[in-house]
Amino acid sequence: MAFTPYSAPPTSDISPVIGEVNDETTWPPYNPRRKPGQTVYVITGANRGLGLALTTTLALRPNTVIFACIRTFTPETTEILTSLPVGQDSYVAPLQIDATVPLHAKQAVEVISRTHGYDHVDVVIANSGISDYYGTAAETPLEALRTHFEVITIGPLALFQAFLPLLLQSAHPRFVAMSSGAASLGDMEHMPLMPVTAYGAGKAALNYIVRKIHFENQGVCSWVLSPG
C-alpha cells in the first residue's frame, strides 16, 4: 500500500472566541463567561468522532469550560463547536492545535491564560490521532512509522509539557490520552493479522509515556482510555 506523508496545514494565528479586547496590564483579563468554580477542559481532535462526542457530552455539565482544539479552523467546524448546547455557566471555545506543531500547544496555553483569564486547567484529553497506513512490519515504510509517532506519541507529550504549569494549578489535575487495543502486546496473538504496525507501535509508546507521566508528576492523575 502506497504511503502519502502527512502534511500539516499552514500555521495561523489562534483567534479567541470571546470578542473582548483585553488590556494586558490587568489581571485577570476581562471575560464575562469566566465564573468561579468552573471545571476547565482541553480536548484535542474535538471536531469529530470521540473528541466531538466528549465535547458535546461534557459541555452539558454546569460550570464547565471546554477549549475544543482542532487541527484546522473552518467556518463549519467553528460553527458546530460554538453552537453546541451547554450547561449553566458553561461554554465551548475552539482553539487551534495541530499535534505535529508543538508551538500550537504553547500558543493555546497563552490564549487560555492571557485572553480567557484562566490560571489553571483541570483536565487535558489528548484525543488527536492518525491511522492512514495499513501494512505488516515488513512492508511498513519508515516514514509512515515516523508520521504516526509524530501525531500519536510525540503530539500528546508536547501537549502535556505545554499544559503542565496550568495543570499544576488545579486542585485535581488529570491528563488523559486515547489508546487502543492495537497497542496491547499481550493481546497481539489474538489479532496477529491486524496490519496496524505504525498505529499500534505509536499507541504502545503512548501508553508508556502516559504511565511515566503518572508516576513522575505527583498529584497529576494520568491514564489512557481504550474506547474500542
Image (cartoon, grey):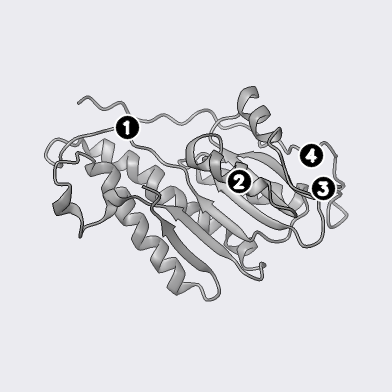
Kind of residue sitting beneath label 3: Arg
Check disc 4 and report the residue beneath it.
18
Check disc 1 and report the residue beneath it.
132
Label whose residue precedes the other's in the sequence (1 or 2): 2
Residue 209 place in picture, x, y as percent: 38, 61
Numbered disc 3: secondary structure = loop
- Residue at 69%, 41% in the rendered image: 93
Q: Residues within 10 Å of mark 4 (few under 14, many from 20)?
A: few
In the rendered view, tell whether residue 170 sits above or below residue 87: below
* Mark-to-mark CA distance, 4 and 3: 8 Å
Kind of residue sitting beneath label 1: Asp
- 45 relative position to 179: left or right: right
The foreground one among 142 and 203 is: 203
Label whose residue precedes the other's in the sequence (4 or 2): 4
* Mark-to-mark CA distance, 4 and 2: 22 Å
Residue 10 place in picture, x, y as percent: 53, 28
Numbered disc 1: secondary structure = loop
Label 1–label 4 contact, CB within 8 A: no
Residue 125 place in picture, x, y as percent: 53, 52
Label 4–label 3 contact, CB within 8 A: yes
Task: Tell which residue pokes out farthest to the left in this image.
Answer: 138
- Residue at 84%, 51% in the rendered image: 29
Kind of residue sitting beneath label 4: Ile
Label whose residue precedes the other's in the sequence (1 or 4): 4
* Mark-to-mark CA distance, 2 and 3: 19 Å
Numbered disc 4: secondary structure = loop
Label 2–label 3 contact, CB within 8 A: no
Label whose residue precedes the other's in the sequence (4 or 3): 4
Check disc 2 and report the residue beneath it.
57
- 158 relative position to 149: left or right: right
Q: Nearer the viewer, mark 4 or mark 2?
A: 2
Label whose residue precedes the other's in the sequence (3 or 1): 3
